[in-house]
Amino acid sequence: MSWTPLGLPAFLFVITVVVFFHELGHFLVARACGVKVDIFSVGFGKEIFGFNDKTGTRWRLSWIPIGGYVKFAGDANAASLPDQKAAEAMAPAEREHVLFFKPLWQRALVAAAGPFANFVLAIILLTGLNMYTGHYALAPIVGTVVQGSAADVAGIKSGDRVTAIDGAKITEFEQLPQIITVSGGKTLVMDLVRDGNPLSLKVTPRTMKVRDPLGDMSTSVVIGVRPSTDKSAITFVKYGPGGAFVAAATKSWDICKTTILGLGQMIRGYASADQLRGPVGIAGMTKQVAEFGFLALLNLTAVLSVSIGLANLFPIPVLDGGHLLYYACEAVLGRPLGERAQDVGFRLGLVLVLGLVLLTTWNDLARLNLF
């Protein structure tokens, strides 16, 4: 528990901000569509404290901080699974404020609003950070090559400047791991400039245990190069509002793209699932980042906001993407899925999510050398 004095407040801050804005997205769009909201909860479990607003919504903070929910009128549970029998027994005046009876497009907007709010939050935070701190760009120049590594075998040398990988233009060193780690170990064509002369080399990345920027060991696909730390390789970029926004949107998109590609590699067996972090891992990571200061914590908040927004769009019942999947089926069939089908999908989705929580928690504990 050595992380508790700093890590616990930092973790609660990050999770609360990300969850609050996610649920606020659902809440605002639902209210705009005339849906009555019974509960707005940050956290699960028993209520710590709360209050009722003038519309009858109960705003509450609950004991289990890793999550939250908005419960609409007519919902059977906190996962927004509709109580169809209760809804159908309602009077016409009550139905006007129940999500179940709203047009399909409005229900889809409400479901998508939570992830969308996460993306908006991330872009706002990253735009502000870009304008305030600027950005130190590290040139894609190889500083050192690990002896015996894939890069060493391929003939890459210190001082080489990487200009492209498989045709993708490279302008900063941080782009290299973004491409290499999701390559699945396939052979890549790297375009370089050495002593002013262009050349192309083929390099086959390898799966190795490496230490991430926070000092944790995990399995990753690498080629074995480190960036040049020469002052001439570092450029400071100062952003105006437009440039800061574009850079923020680009980073958010890169996080989504890298996450999807990385998951694809895990499913195909080309990457290890030990890279996934659960609540324990995120808490430890939050503590480490908080030691660098509040601005670093805001940057982590933005990154997690993108990740949570993306994860909620996966077509898994109990998540927002699951609701969107149901609505897509309804659009195709011309009617909602049956209550039994939705209930089975909900249970399967719950099992999948709980399984993922167990897997990531196991990874977190293994990373702490508790096994």
Image: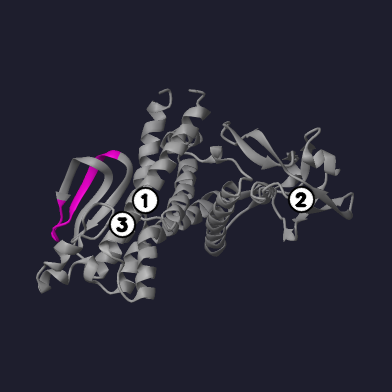
Residue placed under numbered mark 2 in the picture: 187
How would you classify the magenta stretch by its main secondary structure? strand
- Front-lying residue, 70 or 241: 70
Element carrying mark 1: helix
- Front-lying residue, 148 or 323: 323
Q: Give coordinates of residue 136: x percent, y percent.
A: 63, 47
Determine whether, in the image, residue 163 is placed left or right of residue 269: right
* Numbered tag placed on residue 348 in the rendering: 1
Q: Is residue 282 visible?
A: no
Tell me the magenta residue range: 52-64
Which residue is rendered at x = 54% and y = 58% of the image? 253
Q: Is residue 345 magenta?
A: no
- The amino acid at mark 3 is Leu
* Numbered tag placed on residue 24 in the rendering: 3
Q: Which is more N-terminal, label 1 or label 3?
A: 3
Which residue is rendered at x = 43% and y = 51% of the image? 308
